[in-house]
Amino acid sequence: MKPLIIISQSFFGVVLSLTVAMPGLTQVLQESDYYRIDTVPIPQDVVLEVGGMSFTPDGRLGVATRRGEVWLIDDPVMDGSSPPHFQCFAHGLHEALGLAWHNGAFYTAQRGELTRLVDTNGDATADHYKTVYAWPLEGNYHEYSYGPLIQKDGSMVVALNLGWIGYGASLSKWRGWMLSIDGDGQMTPIATGMRSPAGMGTNAEGELFYAENQGDWVGSGYITHVETGDFVGNPAGLRWTDEPDSPLSLKPEDIPDTGRPLFEIAKEIDAFKPPAVWFPHTILGISTSDILPDTTGGRFGPFEGQLFVGDQGHSKIARVYLEKVQGVYQGAAIAFREGFASGVLRMAWDPEGGMMVGQTSRGWAATGGRPYALQRLVWTGNIPFEMHEVRILPDGFLITLTQAVDEPSAGDAASYSVESFTYKYHSTYGSEPINIASHTVRNAIVSEDGREVRLVLNGLREGYIHSITAPGLRSKDGLPLLHPAAFYTVNRTPEGASLLTDADIENAIQPPDPNVLASENKPNVALSVGTLPNLQFSTDEFTVAAGSNISLTFNNDDDMLHNLVVVESAAADEVALAAMQLGLKGHEMQYVPDSEAVLAHTKLLEPGVSDTIVFSVPDRPGGYVFVCTFPGHANTMRGIIRVVDS
């Protein structure tokens, strides 16, 4: 019997994940065989749009919501025969987007302050709300506030979102900053350059990291190691560096807006801290959220000490292996678990070593489909065949596996593929992948115990994300990797002996494949379209050369939901009708039907939200329609991309 292989997604033509049914196995192996999702039942009268989560010492789960409440949940791990009990602990807060239990009380970041919530009489209801520290608030809808994250010294860290006025703006003092607040309410600014710092966390050593979302000056999501005095990318918050307590002196005008890669700009500015690990947009998610280190002592599986990073837009979680090279953090991001009911915003370890996953969708949209959810991720005890660690070497990477490999497949260089790429650093929203190059795998050396493979490459590129895929790798039992792609961010290359020959070095990096998306051998065209009143796109026609790589940004500046779908011109009405017939599945599918006529599409956008799609138009001339397939919009919301001979 031949194995049944199911490919779930590809990146630059390389498999991202696949499952396999081997002879003798009764079912296709999936993520759920290793990590099970249990749903916590929520009472019908409770709208649990999770903004923050924290356990109390007695095992109760506190949940702060975007609607300004804090709920106490008894038995959230569902050990008892009765469903978990919910009690409202606090209410009347202003969109709480964080929660921490500290010194016998809950602390939460509201829009405009850090608040201490105290139950003084033991009735599980807060009767004392104390402002620990307040910050200015302009009132812009995008001025979210996150935290607190409790540090080892007892201080509390909060992060303040930029406002949005068509671009990220620090409309009130300290917006775009990370602040440290002590128990006496004394505030110290730590760092700036944040755009939308939805998640904060520490690594296993207790060092501070934050998660960033794609947007202006941010080509894709990432996590960054943060230290006092760092500038991490978005210049809007630099307007406050004249303040006497600012730890840095950079100005917005010191940051060039050229589109050169972020790493190159950071080399020219001392305070600029590049990301530790990038998450390729639409591949490992679209809206990076919480950061949670595995401190469970093995109760959650084989990834002790690594980080789990959530994604709100794609309703999933990635895994990160970090290492320090020449004093700088970098590492690999690998897919971990998808399929959550709503957008993953917060994660917390429960007393039994399971992961509580708090979710919300309102206003931000998420592939999970539900407006909110609380679920528990539990290790089944089975160990998946995965890349456990990816470490950098002077001439390539050392991959450590969770299981011993099949030596013939592991020792075959053809089992692997490596490409590097990066993003533009500019004031424009997001970026397509740029400067893509292929790296030849010169050798694959398997360790004696079969648990490590050394990949020798013809060169590495500092400042670039290296996609390492191994679709041909098999375990001794014949299983493929559950997730055969790792994305390693190279900030530094280590010194040491290399196995490269002189010929390898002379032919360091292969030129990009002309068929690869965003290849420099084809025209790269940036397009932008917005909306007008009465269901109209702001532009109804573009002309591009045949075969062009297109980066198309759709800005939904209307007051209703829209998407943008590029289709074969003759199929526009057919695709629009199919979208309308999706019924209850429509929102889950972004109102984009499964059709070969669809060339590319944005997600379904909330008002004021943007999305950038990257695709290649066909080599043949013709017309290709872009249309909003939200039911009722297609008749008037459409335009044409005219493809002409180059």
Image (cartoon, rainbow, N blue to C red):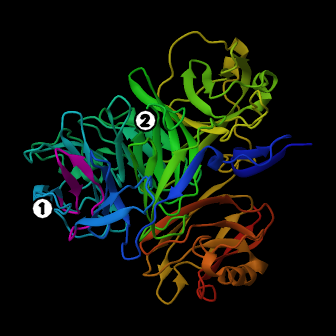
Quadrant in which the N terminus is drawn: top right
Marks 1 and 2 close (CB-CB < 8 Å): no
Question: Residue at 23% of width from left, 68% of height from top?
Answer: 94
Q: How many marks?
A: 2
Q: Amino acid at mark 1?
A: Tyr
> Hey, which quadrant is residue 607 in on the image?
bottom left
In the image, residue 577 sits, relative to residue 389, either above or below, namely below
**Residue 608 at what x, y percent from top left?**
41, 72
Residue 221 is left or right of residue 146, and the answer is: right
**Residue 256 at what x, y percent from top left?**
37, 46
Q: Main secondary structure of the magenta part?
A: loop
Q: Amino acid at mark 2?
A: Thr
Question: Residue at 12% of width from left, 64% of height from top?
Answer: 127
Q: Is residue 550 visible?
A: no
Q: Which residue is mark 1?
A: 129
Quadrant in which the C terminus is drawn: bottom right
For label 1, the SS is: strand
Q: Identify the mark at residue 296; answer none if there is no mark.
A: 2
Residue 270 is left or right of residue 241, and the answer is: right
Magenta span of residues: 91-113
Instruction: Classify mark 1: residues with Cα within 10 Å, few (<14), some (14-19) or many (20+).
Output: some
Residue at the top extreme, as displayed = 497
Asked if the magenta segment contains residue 479, the reply would be: no
Question: Residue at 66% of width from left, 21% of height from top?
Answer: 451
